Amino acid sequence: MNVSVVLFTSDLRLHDHPALRAAHDGSAALVPLFVRDDAVAAAGFTAPNRMAFLADCLADLDAGLRERGGRLVVRSGDVIAQVCKVVSEADADEVHMAAGVSAYARRREDRLRTALEAEGCRLHVHDTVITALAPGAVTPVSSDHFAVFTPYFRHWSRQSLRGAVTAPRTIRVPDGVGSETVPSRAGLSGVSAGLARGGETEARRRLASWLRSGIASYEDRHDDLPGDATSRFSPYLHFGSLSPVELVHRARGAGGAGAEAFVRQLAWRDFHHQVLAARPDAAVADYRTRHDRWRSETDAREDIAAWKEGLTGYPVIDAAMRQLRHEGWMHNRGRLLTASFLTKTLYVDWRVGARYFLDLLVDGDVANNQLNWQWMAGTGTDTRPNRVLNPVIQAKRYDPDGVYVRRWVPELEGIEGAAVHEPWKLRGLDRADYDYPDPVVELPDGLARFKNARGRG
């Protein structure tokens, strides 16, 4: 009997899963496998929010497989050893998996191929499971990847994406392959109180709702901080509970300016993946412009602590950082503002912020987190590396009535309207009534430091 193994990684779904479909169609039985990888834990990528969301995703995947007559096999340890063990137990001929782009994912693929070849087993790696377009599908004439988004998007938009594939109706798992208990978020400590529920079922429910009532207004409202009009799909894309290919097709099917703006954001995600695939060291090293004059973490210790705790004295910055703590997620406009503030107003190394975001973000991944931080810090793909976002101006533009700030900074809930963005302008007893810190730095002083450090002042 021909048996295949499907190794799930960042693709925890049944719908539009080419690796799963190929394994199902090409074999009499298959083993859906997820390995709780020791190397991932050792590298510090087991933040509580992501572990809780992952547990939801695995439980939902197992439930979906059981509805089709199958089950999820869960193992722990070295991923190569565990896959080979399952291949032996199931007498499997093939292993199918999605292609990754990080340096670790590519090493894992190479190691697994070598180990399986020694066992007489073939490895099939499938593109466009984790991204809509494969990282190397479009390249400029003079390079192996696009370093600027606009020309990338122009080429990306001209490509014909593969069609979405259906989920298998039945799945047969061979006897004799044991499994650990599917993990649960129950008992995990350090999980954000407002963390969303994970899993493909929840993801598809949100998708249906979004297509009915969210996507049409996306172009006009995606920066609206109090309205929270983003899709919030990023955690589900990170864990692969939603297919980016299916999202592009369904958004284009909805039509309109909102759909076009949303598809552009999906292209940004692919853009970052193709950058990281070509330059894996961008996860830790400056991608384009090197800066060695960041303030040391020791000198900036108090400012960094205030930024993390949401006590910088700039209400929109503090609101966004508190949302991050409570939900394990942050509005995209908030991410831009907090990153600009840390790297350009406080002049702290982007790696400090990226590391903290990875500690809390449920959607934190190497490609999008690290490269978005570099974009904002001026070391990455931004064509205007010296841009600085003024938190007061931005707050008045994207939270004009102060609703977002008052939602997350209750100390200031008594200040009406846009005045909440500048509480330091209150006078006398009015200012004393609010238990809220003064700004950690005056914006002109921060800007002057930034210009001087970059050699422009």
Image (cartoon, rainbow, N blue to C red):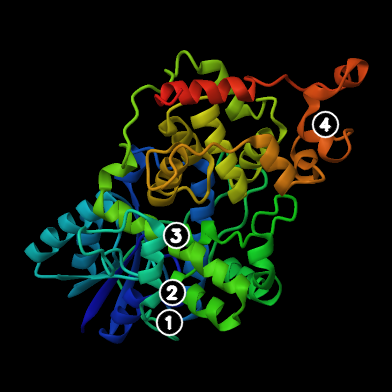
The alpha-carbon separation of the residues under discs 1 and 4 comes to 48 Å
What residue lies at 44% left-to-right and 35% top-to-bottom?
355
Which mark is nearer the camera, 1 or 3?
3
Q: Secondary structure at mark 4?
A: helix
Q: Amino acid at mark 3?
A: Trp
**Amino acid type shown at disc 2:** Val
Asked if the residue under mark 4 is in contact with the one under mark 1, i.e. CB atoms within 8 Å, the reply is no
- Residue 151: give x, y in percent of width and height: 37, 63
CA gap between label 2 and label 3 equals 14 Å
Residue placed furthest toward the front: 457
Going from the N terminus, do you reach mark 1 or mark 2 first?
Answer: 1
Mark 1 or mark 3: name the one nearer the start of the chain.
Answer: 1
User: Does residue 256 appear to the left or right of 43 in the view shown?
Assistant: right
User: Residue 310: x percent and y percent?
Assistant: 65, 30
Q: Are marks 1 and 2 in contact (CB under 8 Å)?
A: yes
Local SS, label 2 = helix
Amino acid type, residue under disc 4 in the picture? Leu
Disc with the residue nearer the chain's start (1 vs 4): 1
Q: Which residue is mark 3?
A: 268
